[in-house]
Each structure stands twice: as structure tokens, then as C-alpha cells.
Image: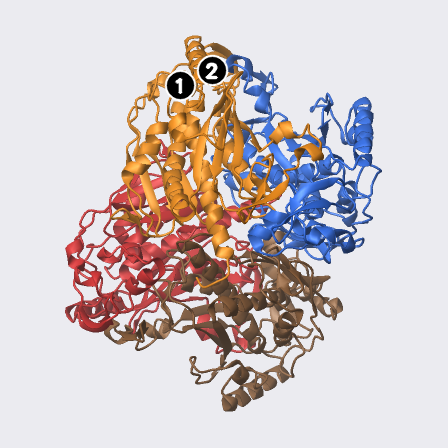
Chain colours: A red, B brown, C blue, D orange
Amino acid sequence: MASTFGHLFRIATWGESHGAGVGVVVDGCPPRLEIHREEIQAELDRRRPGQSKITSHRDEADLVEILSGVEDSLTLGTPIALLVRNADARPGDYDEMRTKFRPSHADFTYQAKYGIRAVAGGGRASARETIGRVAAGAIARKLLARDASIDIVAYVKRVCDIEAEVDPSAVTRAMVEGNIVRCPDEKVARAMIDLIEATRKAGDSVGGVVEAVARQVPAGLGEPVFDRLEADLGKALLSLPACKGFECGSGFAGTRLRGSQHNDAFYPEAGRVRTRTNRSGGIQGGISNGEDIVVRAAFKPTATILMPQETVDVDGKATTLQARGRHDPCVLPRAVPVVEAMMALVLADHFLRQRALRAGAS
Amino acid sequence: MASTFGHLFRIATWGESHGAGVGVVVDGCPPRLEIHREEIQAELDRRRPGQSKITSHRDEADLVEILSGVEDSLTLGTPIALLVRNADARPGDYDEMRTKFRPSHADFTYQAKYGIRAVAGGGRASARETIGRVAAGAIARKLLARDASIDIVAYVKRVCDIEAEVDPSAVTRAMVEGNIVRCPDEKVARAMIDLIEATRKAGDSVGGVVEAVARQVPAGLGEPVFDRLEADLGKALLSLPACKGFECGSGFAGTRLRGSQHNDAFYPEAGRVRTRTNRSGGIQGGISNGEDIVVRAAFKPTATILMPQETVDVDGKATTLQARGRHDPCVLPRAVPVVEAMMALVLADHFLRQRALRAGAS
Amino acid sequence: MASTFGHLFRIATWGESHGAGVGVVVDGCPPRLEIHREEIQAELDRRRPGQSKITSHRDEADLVEILSGVEDSLTLGTPIALLVRNADARPGDYDEMRTKFRPSHADFTYQAKYGIRAVAGGGRASARETIGRVAAGAIARKLLARDASIDIVAYVKRVCDIEAEVDPSAVTRAMVEGNIVRCPDEKVARAMIDLIEATRKAGDSVGGVVEAVARQVPAGLGEPVFDRLEADLGKALLSLPACKGFECGSGFAGTRLRGSQHNDAFYPEAGRVRTRTNRSGGIQGGISNGEDIVVRAAFKPTATILMPQETVDVDGKATTLQARGRHDPCVLPRAVPVVEAMMALVLADHFLRQRALRAGAS
Amino acid sequence: MASTFGHLFRIATWGESHGAGVGVVVDGCPPRLEIHREEIQAELDRRRPGQSKITSHRDEADLVEILSGVEDSLTLGTPIALLVRNADARPGDYDEMRTKFRPSHADFTYQAKYGIRAVAGGGRASARETIGRVAAGAIARKLLARDASIDIVAYVKRVCDIEAEVDPSAVTRAMVEGNIVRCPDEKVARAMIDLIEATRKAGDSVGGVVEAVARQVPAGLGEPVFDRLEADLGKALLSLPACKGFECGSGFAGTRLRGSQHNDAFYPEAGRVRTRTNRSGGIQGGISNGEDIVVRAAFKPTATILMPQETVDVDGKATTLQARGRHDPCVLPRAVPVVEAMMALVLADHFLRQRALRAGAS
């Protein structure tokens, strides 16, 4: 169950970074949804390495094959299996890491947990695992678009100390895709790119924050008390490699306000109940209120850096590691489509769960 | 499933704030664990309203009854049902809220989702729902103590802008229980208490941050890729009323560091692999590494304030609400035992999952 | 999870036979369903001991209390907790069984599994555990009646070698409730009652078969490949105490026919696709086809008999057991409402799952 | 979740009979289990079509590829993805079935449920779907053999009216594999083969019963009350195509005995508690008691026969169908390895669940 996510729209991902390939099985996608291989591929292209000068130089086309569940571009209601073969695996890059644990990476903990690990490339802890998520997320987005007009956009909000001002209600995917760092503020984006390039040259890494918005979400999604919408979105994003923090709406900053400053006043507008502000981030009591859902995920700087580091080897002896390999100096630009995918998966699952509750025939 | 949490150590909570009572069923607790009613009661006493001048004045003894699953103070391996009757319900306090949605509360979203709601006291969205969590958490703690010597302590880290310096590796429960705000820094605690009292007098509310640490957690807990330990801890805390943010280890602040500054160097110590720093918060690759697990949860200011607020009524008309009732001006002191309980539930579940993986007879 | 059943309409039962009480939490029941305490009580009255001369003489009123999830006789969409206190527990009857395992009962296996057991009355293995199922089933039936007009009737088909001829498409609950053995064939019923009475006098027990039919089930319920409708119905009934066999439609007898004899020919009728025969028992490919769903459950003779039996004591020594206590010489009459409840729970769950799949807004 | 099975040892199968291929993801297999591709292939070879004159003539080598989760023939503790490409698909055989529903097949119900279906070969309702189960079952068997010495053997017990006498405690796989119908009684096997051949020539089909035994199962597996071992085994087998009945131990026949005749007397033997008879089929109170677990599954005659049949077309009009295609006149010989696989999956899952309950460190 460790690699299974969701209740009604459920996915199971599989695959190591330097094995035969990676993939996903989507179980529970409703039937007769139109989906084309190219639509899934387009999302994978946004995630793949080698897409720009600021990402890992591993050369993977990440071509996806639909193995089941779709006929004549329509879903059958049966499990959809998607496969991406690994191509440019270079296990030789990992010779040293075979015996030395990379600080702050998953090497040591996988060994401690399983007593064995796929050494090359981090195995299952590699960002390559997110391919299955992005592929499944592309299908979830189609469902959300067809049945609910829900629209999801993520973007790089901050890299290290460089932060962009973005209006979540107005940002478009075109703005995000307008530059390689995926920050909709062009000027700030250039500074981010410069920082990432300089960091790569230094053999170092940087982290930052991705912000995401889901618009036109109907009021009523979310299942208190445990499957509150923040809780499921939080789990979804915190399950991503390198993610160490999550917040919704005003988040940590909101805890510095008084209730009288923080509450979102209600007002009526065209038959709907609206809020004057959106410090709740579109979620109240764990349920969507119809306003934009706004969340943020904190990504730590990439653990694999190309500088000498103090560490321990598999025999428990002190040693020094000088890592090699092709790594992202900053995971954020490629994390953007992954965050969108996770958000789509959570919303699709909750959308179906809510549909089951409505009175009427099945 | 909305009110069910956990896989192997699984709980189902139930109950509205002004109904007959609240409770929980714990399914999957191992047999022959010693547990006394008084141990559960002691945790509930830390959570109950009316315990001090800075909490809600609702008078509830919150006496727990063990209905099943325990005989002669030993668990049977069968479901443990725990019941707490509601005593001091005053539905009359909620007459105005019957027709007017409290801003930033769950009134509107419950109505939007279910087309009906328990008006008095917030029903299921009330903090009273956490009684079942705390009761179940008391059992989880006993299991963690017996089989793994794991020790969990939470405390108020910040109220509004007043922040305490606390050493997670040294803090004790006695220090936390030393004052009514549950902040182990006595001097800061006094300032926090003053702020909360002033806030109550103003009819307003404040939020803040609870920090929690789990010590002596063995390396190896956590189930990538979706049930990463951060992800499950995050979901657990984000499922609490008023929680809008979560972070582990360095969290959001860590995203401002370079990888070379952020990585936790490994070194050997007495046959164990240790880290020199703990920016990972005891979790790497979603799996515990044997260091202290440190997390933080952001709680927004309580939504129910006693000042006039702009809102909408159930007929969709603009109106003004002047709330009444007995409310916490700050949820943090009472959130401390709840955070500990959720952490214990997550760790107990993962502890059992890890035990299942180990080779050997059942 | 052992005591949790269902996905969307999910129940968690709890309680030992001689503890404080038994009960259930229903999580996932849609909101605004009308349900009265008396409707649940009426089902429990059909299940309770002491209802006639051929059932156990234990005197339990089995009065149910609704603790949560219902307000003004309408479900809130939140968990519904139901409680029945144990009243007439006589632990003293079980003194001998405290040290000697009853043959073919659960005494030995509970001890082997958990290393501990609730000695009195079989604890969790007692038929008393089914109270929670029947109470939850009463709610499921209301949902099925409101949203799908589904109607469920079970009856005693055979006691030992005495078998009734019953037309599943025409049998009514009134016919079933017309006698204390719950067999709609009055003449056969009298013979069954005589056999059960004679068996009780001999200190012995008898088994038999319960048959059940669900009518007006829409085509399309069931979730291949694992949650096929037969599979979930089979699991539901095989999870009942004393149930050792299950079949759907032609079942075991159907395996003696040729395909040309067994297939159910399709024909059109008033815009619907119907079958001329119903050897499929209303389920094809694991999905309902709109015909009557017909299943049968085999109940072995009650294990607790009042004759001396060879057995082993808790120290592993050979001994003889002469059981005491108040037991059913035949579980079938009281199993009828339990079988109906399990069928209702399975159909309610699948009904909601199917509703989630239908295109359209949530 | 419809195509997901198991809790701790969990599988997700996917694939249509005439699509790109079929497969499975195994999530939760413990690490460091030795598994070779050839071991999985050997089980698939027992299941594949074209293996003898009495099975379908579809020519499929069913070669399995391990895509993830295994390195150097050791499991990593991560998901194991297995893929089998479809080779000899002949969709043209199904032209008539595109518009006409096969009686007693899944054509109509899939269409009713999903509003769409994979016409060729039955899609997901094809026996081809069981490839993933058999492949996963091969891994489960390795786990059971390594950690618990559990041994599973299934065999054809009856074809139509031809029944074999088999001693479950003594039957071996070699005896089962000694003939193409997989009945360990050679003389009866020949009669069965003759019947199946004659049936094929007539364009008709026959059903029957598969019996299976698991030996050396430790006492204590099974999780009352819903995940009783019979209940989970029953669900597992009833989820197989064409299975309409299940029984454990004495099953339906046992309901004709008195309790005094049916109970299995206990006696001590070499420090273990044994039973003199095994009418319980190795399971009491839903938990294994250490005796052989014996179950039976009823398989109806194959629905697809080559004789004209009355049916309805997709427009709801009466018509006649004359099916074509390559079909098994009797599914039983190929069902034997599938039944073993399902039994192994259930026992592996329960074995891990029981291991989690035992006191001690993880």
C-alpha cells in the first residue's frame, strides 16, 4: 500500500531510476473519458530531465506507452497501465555511492529499512518515480476538466531568497511556461535562473517554494475529519521527494494575525456565497468553499551535491564522499508539473467521493 | 472512510459536539498491551475545556468509558471502543448561528457539502471531535513505549508573534505541563498567557505554532513513496481543526539554505550511524533515520470571535453576526496533547507496518 | 482493519459478548437520509436471543442508542455510532470453558492468535457481534430503498435435511416472519421447528442453509476484477459466525450442467434486457444484470453442545468438556436478519461506488 | 480499488485480453526475498492457453518481464511490476460479438456498468486477467515457503459429474501435474479428459469443482470479524471468472450433520493441539488452527459455446448468436494454478498481518 494513493481515483506507481522503467496503474478512472497518449506525453515532457540548462542533463525522452484501459482514446473504466522505459541509465556514475551514504539522501534510511537498496540513482527515492504520478495526473486533469471545469496551475514562487509576486487568481499556464524556471514573473525568473546556474557551477544546490492554485473548484470537496482537503493535499505534496513543508492559504504567516484580521468575511454574489479575502486558501473545515484553493510546498536544496562531504560507509566507518552523476541543482522547475499532478489526483479522488454522496440513482 | 485513520493501527472517530457524546474505535491494537482507564483519562484531562483561565469555559469532565477490547487491563487484540458522554451542551448559545454562517468556520462548507449540518457547537467540525483521537493516542503511546521506547513531547512554540526557544532533544513533559499555556520556556509562557487573556477580553483570538518531537524512534519507519513518514505526519496534523501548515525539520526556513549548508553530515557513533545536525528532522527519503523526529503545525486564530462580522445567512442574504458561546481564544494549549496523540497514532501504525516486513515466522 | 467492512459505506463493529456492550460506527452514509431509532430496533428485535422457544434463552432486550450522526431523524453525513449495552451476561456459565477449549469453536484459535481471549461467551466470536452489523444494515436498507427501490429478503431454506421450496421472486418478509423458524413454507417450517426442539432436548445442534434474494437491483453494480459482486457478497456472508459455504445462482449444482443447459438466454422486454432463466443469480462477470440476486449461505451446526466432548485444556492436556450456558441449538432463524443486513451493506457500498463513476457534476 | 487486492501484500492487476498486454504490480512484498524470473514463468506456463488438447488453442507464450522491485534476484521491498505482452490476439474472431451479447458472459453487464467495453475477447472479463494473479502468486508462495514452510496444492476434484477421491493431506504437485486435466486420480482423470474432448467436439462446455489444500499453516492466521480467513479465501476465489460457489472444510455437506457429529475433537500431540477430524477445514472462528486448510471452488460451464443461442444485440433487439473464437471447453485444468495463486496471496497477506501483531521490536 506504500506505493498506492487515493481511494476512488487510485494510483499505484512502480519503478527504480536505473531499472527497466517506471510506470503507474490508475484504478478507478470513470469510463468514456477521452484521453490521448499525446496529452499524457505533454505533461511528461514538462517533467523530463534534460529539458533546459538548469535541469539534470540525463537524457531521457520519457516516452509513455498506454498498455491497458483505453480503447479508441476512450477510457474503459478498467485499470489504465502506463509504462515509460528507462533509457539513459549510467549506473557507473554511482560506484562510489554504492558503499557511501549520501548525506540527507535516502541511501542510509532505505538500507536501514529494507536491508537492501537499489544503489544506482537512488532507486525508488529518485525523482524519476514521479513519472507515474505525472502520467496519472494528466488523466485526472482531463476528468476534472470534463466534469467540473477545474483548472490547476503551479509555479515557482521562490528560489532560495528570490521570491516572486504572483496573483494566483490570474496566473496562466502560458505565463508559467514562458521561461525555463517556471516562474510567471519574468524579471524574477531571470534572477532565479542566474542563481541556479551559478549554484550548479559551484557544485552546490538550492531549494525553494512551489505555489499552486486550483480554480473553479465546487464547494463541498473534502471529507472531514481525517480526509480533510488540506490533509490530503498536504500528504500528496509531502510525499514528493525533497518536500519538507506544506501550507494552505495564509499558512504559517496567518498564525501571526488576530482572528478579527484573519477571518474571511462572507458576502453574497450572484446567488453564490463568496469571501472578501481568501486567507482560508479556499478550504474551510477541511472542505472547499468555492474560492481558489491555494497551497505551497517547501522543497529543500537537492541532497546530491558535487562537493566533498563527511559521511559513513556501509560498514559504518567514517569517510568522505565526492558525489558524481547528473543532478538537478534545483528541483523546483521540474517539480511544478509534479505538484499540479498531485493536486489533480487529490481533487479527482475527492470529486468522485463527493459524487457518491449525492442523492439519486446510481 | 472519512473518519477512519491508519492502516494497521486504525481508528474511527465519531460524535458531534452537542450530541450524545463522542468516541473512537481502535481496530488493530496488538493484544496483551497493558492499558488502564486512568491512563486514557489523564490524556483527556490535558485536552478538556475549562482546565484553565485561558481555555473555553465549557464544563466537561470528559470521563471516558472503555466499552470493549480490554479485559483485566489487557488488550484482547479486538476493537477497543471508547465513549465520552457530552455533558455541558448549551445548544441555545447557537441560536443565531443556526441561520448565519460564521466567517472562516466550517458552517458554510458543511452545509454546501451535505445539505444539512449539526448547528450547535459546530457539530463534527468542533474541537470536541479530537477527544477520540486523544483517547486512541494514549493507547498508541503505550504500544510505542512497550515495544520501542519511543517518547513523544509536544509544546507551544509560538503564540502570535511570541516565540519560545526550545531544545527538542531535551524538553520534558514536566516542563511543558509546568504552565497553563504548555510552553516549556517559563518566561515566554507568561507573555503568551498575558496575550491570550488580553485577546479574550477583546473578544478576539490568536493562533500560533505547536512543535513536537519523537525521540528514540528506530531507523526504518515510513513507507515510500506515498506513505512517507513526513506525508503521514503531515496528513495527521493537517487533519486537525484550524491547522493550515506543517513542516518537518528545517521546513520552510531550510529552503533558504544551500545544499552544502543544509545537508546533515553522517558520522559513526557507538555502532550507529548518526547525523551532526538534524535539518532533516529525523526523516530522510520519507523514512526515519534514528534522530529525533521534529515537526511543527501552524494553527490559525480561532474562527469564532465575539465581535460583529460581515457574513451571509442560510438564505444567501448579507447580514451581520455577533457570535456567542464559550470558545477558546487560542487553541494551542489544548492542541498540544492532540498533536502528541496524532504523532503517536502515525508512529504506531508505521511501527506495526515495519514489523510485518521483517523476515521470520509470524 | 479486521473489524472494518466496506469502502464507501463502511462499518466498524466492536464489542465482546459479555463485556459492556456491542456496537458499530457507520462511516460514509450519505446525508439527509431519514432514519428512526425504531427502524433499527425492529431489525435488532428479529435478531435478539430469547425471541422464541427455539433460540437461546439469554434475555437481552438489545435496545439501541444512536450516539451520533443523526439529528431530527436525518443523517448528517457524519459517522453514525450505535450502542447496545449487554444486560444478561452470566460469566459464571463459562467457568469450565475458561480452561477447556470447546471443539470447533473459536476458543483455541483466538488463544493461538492473540495469546489471550475474552473467555466468557466467546467474546468477539460470539454471535452477539452481529448486532452491529444488523443495526448498520438497517441504515443501508433505508438508503437502498430511497435511492434505488432495492428490496432484500432472506429465509431459512434448509435445516439439516429438511428443505423448503421457495420462489425467490415472490417471497415476502411477511411470509418469512410468519413463523419462528423464518421459513416461508409453513408446513416445512413446522417440521423444522420440531427438529430444532428435539435437537435442543438432546443437547445437540443442527445447521442448514439460508437463502437470500435482492430484487430491483439495477444492472451495473459490482467492481471487477476483485470486488466482483459475488466476491463481496461471499466475503460478507462467509464472515458470519458458523458460515462455511456460499453460492450464487446455480452455485455448486450448476457445475453439473453443460454450458448449453446453463446459459441464461437474453431477450428484450419493455426496453430492458432480461434473461429467460436466472442460473447466474443476477450476477454476470461480477456485475449485477438487473435480475434477482440470489445467494445461499451454509451454516454448520452450532459448536457449543451440551454433551461431553473430548478436548484439550489451556495447559495442553487431554480432558473432557461438558459445556453449559444458553445456546442456540440452530443459528438459522436468527441468522436471517443478519444475512439480510450483510447483503444490504454490500449493495449500499456498491451502489455508492457505481454512482461515483457516472459522468456529471458532483 | 476494484482491481486491487490485499492489505499488506497487495496486488493491482491490469490489462485487457486483446490489448497490449496484461500485468500486475505487487506492493508490500518484504525485501530480500529471492525470486527468479523463471519461477514466475513456470507458474504462468501452467496457466497459459494452448498447453494441451483440452485447453483453448490460443497460442500465447505468456513470457513475463520483471520491470521493477527486484535486483540481482532479490526483492528490494519496493513495488514489483510484472508485464506479459499479448501476442496471438485475433480481434476478428469477435466481430459478431461486437454487437451481440453472449449469454451468461460479461458482455451485457460491462456495457450496462461502463457504457463501453473492450469487445475483443471479453476485455477485462477474460481469463487472461488472471495472468497477473498467477505471477504475483508465485512471489507470495516464495514468501510463504521461506518464512513459514507453507505448501499449497490445488487440483481438479470434479468435472461435471465425474468426481475424484483425493486425500488433501497426501496429494502432491507431481500427482496433479501428472495429467493434462490436473486431477491426481489417474483413472478418473482419463474419464474427465474424454468428457472434455467430447464436449469440445459438440461445441459445448462443462464446469466442475477445484479443491485446494494449504499445509503447514501456523495456527493464528485470519483477522476476525470481517477478514476471517474463510471470508478472505472465499472472496479471493469468488473473484475468479466463472466461480459461483465456495466452501471450506465440510461446507454445504456439513450442514446435514448434528453438532455432535460435526465437531472436531481436540487432542494433544507432541506439544501441539490437534483435531481428530478436520470438518473445520483448518479454520475455526475465522482463524487457522494448524490443520490443513481445505477449500473448494465451483466453476460454472464456460459461457462461450459454439452453438446458436438466443440473445439480444446492443440495440436491444432479439437475435441469435453463433459464437466463434478459441475457448476453453472447461476452465478447470487452467484454473488450478490460479486457485493456488489466490490462496497464496491471501495467506501471504494474513501472514504479514499476523507478524505485525506479535510483541517485540520492529
Query: Label 2 amino acid?
Result: Ser
**Residue bearing mark 1:** D327
**Residue bearing mark 2:** D205
Which chain letter matches label 2? D
Q: Is residue C25 above or below residue D304?
A: below
Q: Is residue D118 visible?
A: no
Q: Is residue C236 above or below residue C122?
A: above
Circles 1 and 2: CB distance less than 8 Å? yes
Q: In the visual, does A21 lie left or right of C104? A: left
Q: Secondary structure at mark 2?
A: loop
- Observer-nearest residue: C243 or A27? C243
Residue D184 placement (x, y as % from top left) = 44, 24
Q: In the visual, does C63 lie left or right of B331? A: right
For residue B328, what is the image quadrant? Answer: bottom right
Q: Is residue A231 visible?
A: yes
Q: Secondary structure at mark 1?
A: loop
Crowdedness near tag 1: few (<14), some (14–19) or many (≥20) residues, C-alpha within 10 Å: many
Spatial distance from mark 1 to mark 2, Cα to Cα?
9 Å
Residue found at x 44% / y 58%: B355
- Observer-nearest residue: D306 or C251? C251
Outermost residue, bottom direction? B187
* Residue B30 image label: none
Residue found at x 82% / y 33%: C197
Residue D86 placement (x, y as % from top left) = 31, 29
Query: Label 1 amino acid?
Result: His
